Image (tube, rainbow, N blue to C red):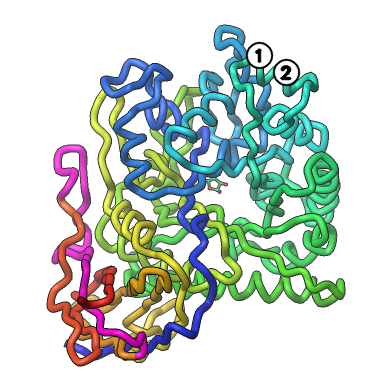
Amino acid sequence: MTDAQIRLDPGFTVAPVSRRTFGSFVEHMGRGVYTGIYEPGHPTADADGFRQDVLDLARELGVTVVRYPGGNFVSGYRWEDGVGPRPGRPVRRDLAWHSLETNEVGVDEFMSWARKAGVEVMYALNLGTRGVQEALDVHEYLNHPDRTHLAEQRRANGADEPYGIRMFCLGNELDGPWQTGHKTAHEYGRLAGETARALRSADPDLELVACGSSGSSMPTFGTWESEVLELTYDTVDYISAHAYYWPTNGDIGSFLASAVDMDHFVNSVVATADSVGARLKTAKRLMISFDEWNVWYQDAHEAKQATEWEVAPRVIEDTYNVADAVVVGNLLISLLRHSDRVTAACQAQLVNVIAPIRTEPDGPAWRQTIFHPFALTSRLAKGDVLRVEISAPTYLTDRFGEVPLLDAVATHDPQTGDLTVFAVNRHLTEGLDLTVPVAGFGHPMSVAEAWTLTDEDLYAVNTVDHPDRIVPHPTAGVTVDGGVLSATLPPVSWSAIRLVRAG
Ligand code: AHR
């Protein structure tokens, strides 16, 4: 057993917790939509064809905002195909995922699902094959209140009131050569800037997201952000970031430290954006929309090429183990730590496609291991994010050098007095004895709840037959004594400990 300590103070805050940190993503990809959120004929389907078992799990997950309709899919998507009477909707090729899109679900259906799920929608525009006009058209259809042609069309399709979507992504991953309509930073920056200006003429209050890099390992990372922001800084509010992690060559030690990479990624984008702001002599600060992040076993899928044009094929349905859940919990710690600049984030994706929720057609829906840290963090992270000072031994990783065995963040709600500590032990074999002095909060505290996700088998998973093989359990040895919180964090574990005012 090794000792580790966290120091924190209610006066040292990073920023309020942004509820948009707990976003997710539904793309028309694989079985994300069809047999994911939507399956008419399923035993739990409601009158609109939405699976209520999935809706229940999405609510339990605590998702706040959902990015839609893609992803790579959006760069070839025609939104008009998915509105109006269903029999008239065309079946199209989806070049991004080499599959067929029936358009049975379009934006009106998705907005109805989002209302049922109680989530905000972050709408991604197609700036791959389309441009300013399409962006204005879909915005008019979705949001325009008066009697214009497209607002009337929306009404005729059943939605009297404008949807009032606030966040729009100006395309998706246009730095990537795989993207339909891939562009140079200059080409994209010009188009994104023009689109943003046009959208703002329609509604100055929109929150617009410029595409950042599709990963920090992209050869253009940094210069892409810089060039794009030179052309868009005044007209956008966010720059996006995307990151996926997996244990390359089975290097579990580095994998468990994936949050080190996410921290570095965020710091680099902030530095780049701020340097553009400084060059432009503006006080405006951009935020980061980390609108794709997760564990994704990209090695396992690279070799597979779709040969048939199928509707809703099984695509990248990763099954997540305990180590993956610990990494996901740690990535949420990293996102919270950066709440002063990362104010929106979407785990990619919600159902079936690299997702916390899995379904079988005509069968059950279940929680993957990664569901649990997300749901607990969304439920327990309240109030302000606190700055934490971590004292812990380190271990050597191939990718990041020496890395602390402990990572942690804390939130404090000044209204209720609740203090929640989120912590990860990255040690493969040894527990950590964690202590956190809490006397500085000015009143006695006691433990309200404490949950740990771990297992002796790092590779244990939840399956359709054993959906609850991995669930969080009460944390061992949690006490508050003499103004000090103590807990034992097992090897490779993620924990959340909530303290309340005692008495
Ligand atoms: O989330 C899966 C895919 O990953 C998205 O479609 C794309 O934007 C990213 O490369």
Q: Main secondary structure of the magenta part?
A: loop
- The residues colored magenta run 440-468
Left or right of 429, for residue 60: right
Q: Which mark is residue 445?
A: none
- Mark 2 lies on a secondary structure that is helix
Would you say the residues marked 1 and 2 are in contact, meaning their CB atoms lie under 8 Å apart?
yes
Left or right of 177, for residue 453: left
- In this rendering, is residue 445 above or below 109? below
Name the residue at 70% across, 63% down.
220
Residue 50 drawn in magenta: no
Query: Which residue is nearer to you in this view: 462 or 381?
Result: 381
- Mark 1 lies on a secondary structure that is helix
Residue that label 2 marks = 152
Instruction: Give the amino acid at mark 2.
Output: Glu
Residue 446 drawn in magenta: yes
* Quadrant housing residue 75: top right
Instruction: Give the amino acid at mark 1.
Output: Ala
Extreme residue in the top direction: 87
- Measured in 3D between alpha carbons, the distance from the residue under mark 1 to the one under mark 2, in whole angstroms, is 6 Å
- In this rendering, is residue 51 above or below 317? above
Extreme residue in the front direction: 503
Q: Which mark is residue 156?
A: 1
Query: Which residue is nearer to you in this view: 16 or 375?
Result: 16
Name the residue at 53% across, 53% down.
292
Ligand 1 lies under 8 Å from the Cβ of mark 2:
no
Q: Position of residue 65 (x, y in %)?
A: 51, 47
> Which quadrant of the figure contains the C terminus?
bottom left
Q: Position of residue 73 (x, y in %)?
A: 59, 36
Q: Is residue 430 visible?
A: no
Ligand 1 lies under 8 Å from the Cβ of mark 1:
no
Badge 2 density bin: few <14, some 14–19, many ≥20, Cα 10 Å = some
Q: Position of residue 114 (x, y in %)?
A: 49, 35
